[in-house]
Amino acid sequence: GQQVMQIPQYQHVQEGEDFTTYCNSSTTLSNIQWYKQRPGGHPVFLIQLVKSGEVKKQKRLTFQFGEAKKNSSLHITATQTTDVGTYFCAGGGSNYKLTFGKGTLLTVNP
Amino acid sequence: DADVTQTPRNRITKTGKRIMLECSQTKGHDRMYWYRQDPGLGLRLIYYSFDVKDINKGEISDGYSVSRQAQAKFSLSLESAIPNQTALYFCATSDPLLAGDTGELFFGEGSRLTVL
């Protein structure tokens, strides 16, 4: 079945440094979504990418969807302590279900 | 008040007991899901339902059953709980704009289950 690999599993940065997490799918995706889960919280939707090569920005966050629609990345510029949490990608296939990556836990040292 | 409400939020039970986790939503969404989260394993789909009469297995449905009592309610049951079902369980809903899309998932606060 469809698999979505996400790296790194953990990332610790100093406040102000940049951060990137990557997702790779074993199959071509119809779309990819990104979620953020704060410690002790529930996943919250950030964005969905649908088009090949799509790039979207939300303030300091930049999301990319690869040309082959098999990989994606989330980049945070100048991290802040409020960015702490686990970031998940979730790939949408042809079966109307999302397959989640295992997530990247980001910690930020102030 | 939360749009997606899960009860109980925390539960400790013993091996062999029957457990039901309940989910109710006020978003009016047709699609509802149950996910399980384990440390380092991400979110794995247990069951999903696209309508009241529709039930579908996810990737880890063994040992679980579900009931979609109404559009707003989707319950998850563990008929005979075992320790490796200790996890954080999330209910979610979605309402995709396009027929072939999944749509944004709206998650409940989670139900933490411990099986001793």
Image (cartoon, coloured by chain):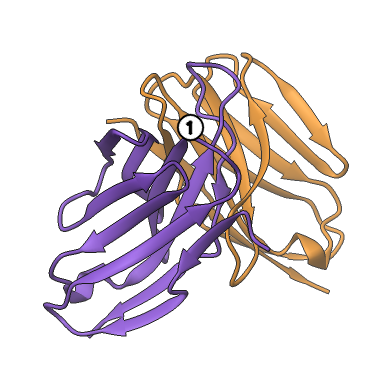
Chain colours: A orange, B purple
Q: Residue at x 16, y 78 (%)?
A: B17
Placement of A2 over or under A103, stated as above or below: above
Q: Which amino acid type corresponds to the residue marked 1 in the rendered image?
A: Gly
Placement of B2 over or under A56, stated as above or below: below
Q: Nearer the viewer, residue B6 or B100?
A: B6
Q: Nearer the viewer, residue A69 or B43?
A: B43
Residue A49 picture location, percent across and down: 64, 25
Q: Residue at x 59, y 31 (%)?
A: A72
Residue B109 picture location, percent across and down: 55, 64
Q: Residues within 10 Å of mark 1 (few under 14, many from 20)?
A: many
Q: Nearer the viewer, residue A88 or B55?
A: B55
Does residue A78 appear left or right of residue B32 in this picture? right
Subunit bearing disc 1 = A
Does residue B43 appear left or right of residue A74 in this picture? left
Kind of element beneath mark 1: strand
Residue A65 picture location, percent across and down: 63, 24
Does residue A31 appear left or right of residue B50 in this picture? right
Placement of B9 over or under B64, stated as above or below: below
Q: Residue at x 53, y 15 (%)?
A: A68
In which quadrant of the rendered view does residue B81 lie? Answer: bottom left
Total numbered circles? 1
Q: Quadrant of the N terminus of chain B?
A: bottom right
In which quadrant of the rendered view does residue B83 lie? Answer: bottom left
Q: Residue at x 11, y 77 (%)?
A: B16
Q: Which residue is mark 1?
A: A91
Name of the residue lying farthest toward the front: B70
Q: Quadrant of the C terminus of chain B?
A: bottom left
In which quadrant of the rendered view does residue B21 lie? Answer: bottom left
Residue B19 picture location, percent across and down: 25, 71
